[in-house]
Amino acid sequence: MSSSEATARAGLCRVGASLHARGYTHGATGNLSVRLEDGFLMTPTGARLDELRPERLSRLDVQGRLESGEPPTKEAGLHLAMYRSRPRAQAVVHLHGTDSVALSLLPDLDPADALPPYTAYYVMRVGRLKLLPYFPPGDAALALAVGEAAQHTHAMLLAHHGPVLAGRSLDAAADAAEELEQTARIHLRVGGRGCRCLSSTERAELERRFPHEA
């Protein structure tokens, strides 16, 4: 095993434990992956993110076939679809955070831009959030929908399910997922009341200064 792969394995375990400890996912929900030079590492199916072990992670080849470790998350197809559509992405984070799932249940969201630009950091780390319709977890149609959406955005919200975000690194993807969860909480707290968001000019300037690289 190369030193870079060993570092990637340790990073998946570290980030998974951190996300779980702070309530961004719960129980045996959520899954993470990173791109290797010759394949992918993913969290195993049914694994708790706070109990990951480097040697038990799923190692897939470039075609998505299991090479070693435990069987991968049932959402492996979702991760692979994101990587195919976004060749610069180095990591994918899929969580089941309470506030982002609650957001996905609201009836009046714009499917192309599900959250207003409340803060600069939301625009910088998440950008425009695409809402996808409901599909059963692990369904092939879900992976197809994610792959199509990923051609246009690195951040999406699955209805009744949770967010999926790609990043130029695992830490960047996790940071974006946390920013999304916090912004969903803001949206739920303001409860539809009129509030001051960033203007279209302010948003465009942030998008120009901080383009999403993954």
Image (cartoon, grey):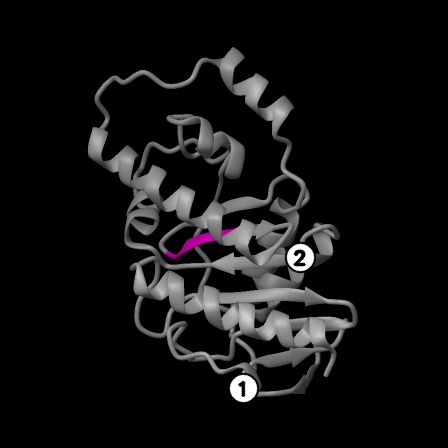
Question: Seen in the image, is 5 located left or right of residue 130?
Answer: right
Q: Is residue 56 left or right of residue 109?
A: right
The reply to whether the C-beta atoms of the residues labelled 2 and 1 are less than 8 Å apart is no
Q: Is residue 3 above or below residue 84?
A: below
- Region in magenta: 161-165
Q: Quadrant of residue 190?
A: top left
Relative image position of residue 156 (x, y in whole percent): 51, 46
Work out whether residue 206 or residue 128 is closer to the camera in this orientation and state it: 206
> Could you tell me which secondary element the residue under label 2 belongs to?
loop
46 versus 172 height, above or below: below
Residue 165 location (% of width, % of height): 53, 50
Q: Which mark is residue 90?
A: 2
Query: At label 1, which amino acid type do we have?
Result: Arg
The secondary element bearing badge 1 is classed as helix
From the image, tell me which residue sits under label 1.
56
214 w.r.t. 33: above or below:
above
- Image quadrant where one finds the N terminus: bottom right
163 falls in the magenta region: yes
Earlier along the polypeptide chain: callout 2 or callout 1?
A: 1
Q: Residue at x 70, y 71 (%)?
A: 4
Residue ID at (45%, 34%): 122
Q: Residue furthest front?
A: 3
The quadrant holding residue 77 is bottom right
Hey, what amino acid is under mark 2? Gln
In this picture, residue 37 sits left or right of residue 188: right
Q: Residues within 10 Å of mark 1 (few under 14, many from 20)?
A: some
Image point 53% across, 54% down: which residue?
171
Query: Viewer-proximal residue, 107 or 25?
Result: 25
Residue 75 vs 195, above or below: the answer is below
